[in-house]
Image (cartoon, helix red, strand yellow):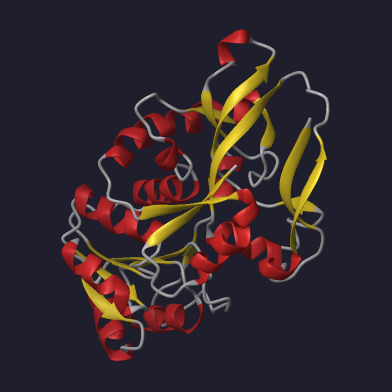
Amino acid sequence: MENSALWFRQFGEPEQVLTLEQTPLGPFIPGTLRVRMHYAPLNPSDLIPITGAYRHRVFPPRIAGYEGVGIVEQADLPEWIGQRVLPLRGEGTWQRWVDCPIQWAVPVPDNIPNELAARGYINPLAAWLMLKKWSVVGKSVLVTAAGSTCAGLLAQWAKKQGATEVYGVYRSAQHLPALVKSGIIPLNMNDGHGIADAAARVEVVYDAVGGELATLMLDHLNPQAALISYGLLSGKAFSPRGKNVTARRFHLRDTLAVTPVEEWQGWFISLWELLLQTQQPEVAVYALEEWRQALALFREPGRQRKPLLSL
């Protein structure tokens, strides 16, 4: 039996260095689950490591992809057979078969659709944990990259948690109607004065952009406010110190590294029900062989749909 997988064997732009390769499926490893993958999404966190941005800890040759959903087809324990799971923190997920250590497999409840389960890890867990660590109850909030999946979850869940108001910095005008419909106060990325004014008023900022935008906000935040940096979509670093505030860093992998498996497995019990009540972008499904078309959609400014690879 053969496996198909998207590999990167050197750093570079994903369009140039990803290759779809077929290799014989190796023997089953006791203590793991062999998962036949169904869907895997395309996220910035999947693509940025391919460029070499995290070369100190992620290096080729490697199969791409960090999340997705599949069904267990081989296991030591028969009760796992047929169970849908998220195979986390193992091999890359942009492949047809994933061998996952049992402790890293998250069972998916029957009432969760595959298209939702496939994107139920990175963005939802990051947003949920940030809101848990930096509560926004009774506070005003600002999110950057407001059209992105994680920022959308942060904004919705912040309002649900009891935030008094939520500002959203957007780049593409195509995101504006959805932001307004969700009750988010929109701020254009090019409106420096508006962003500075909002930064001076809010109490919590969740920033996924970094660069000049993060520097601008840090320079105008009040001393009691918090800026949480969880991404660098701009590709540019920034000084973590502003006039009055020092940025705080959040990375999902750091949190998972110091959390007992039983605890973070339990987080998903809360997440699944929350996700069923949450508005998310529609999906566009592409066969694994159509990965270039999926990447092209991902790159579209102001896109309204989430590309999923059907594996």
Depth check: 205 or 285 in front?
285
Q: Image quadrant for the N terminus?
A: top right
Left/right placement of residue 204 relative to residue 125 reads left
Q: Quadrant of residue 196?
A: bottom left
The residue at the point 35 percent across, 67 percent down is 147
The residue at the point 49 percent across, 33 percent down is 264
Depth check: 178 or 161 in front?
178
Q: Quadrant of residue 242?
A: bottom left
Q: Image quadrant for the C terminus?
A: top right
The residue at the point 53 percent across, 29 percent down is 85
The answer to whether 283 is drawn above or below residue 110 in the figure is below
Q: Is residue 14 visible?
A: yes
Indicate the position of residue 244 as horizontal and vertical percent values.
Answer: 38, 78
The residue at the point 77 percent across, 18 percent down is 30
The answer to whether 230 is drawn above or below residue 80 in the figure is below
The answer to whether 217 is drawn above or below residue 66 in the figure is below
Left/right placement of residue 80 relative to residue 217 reads right
Depth check: 308 or 276 in front?
308
The answer to whether 212 is drawn above or below residue 137 in the figure is below
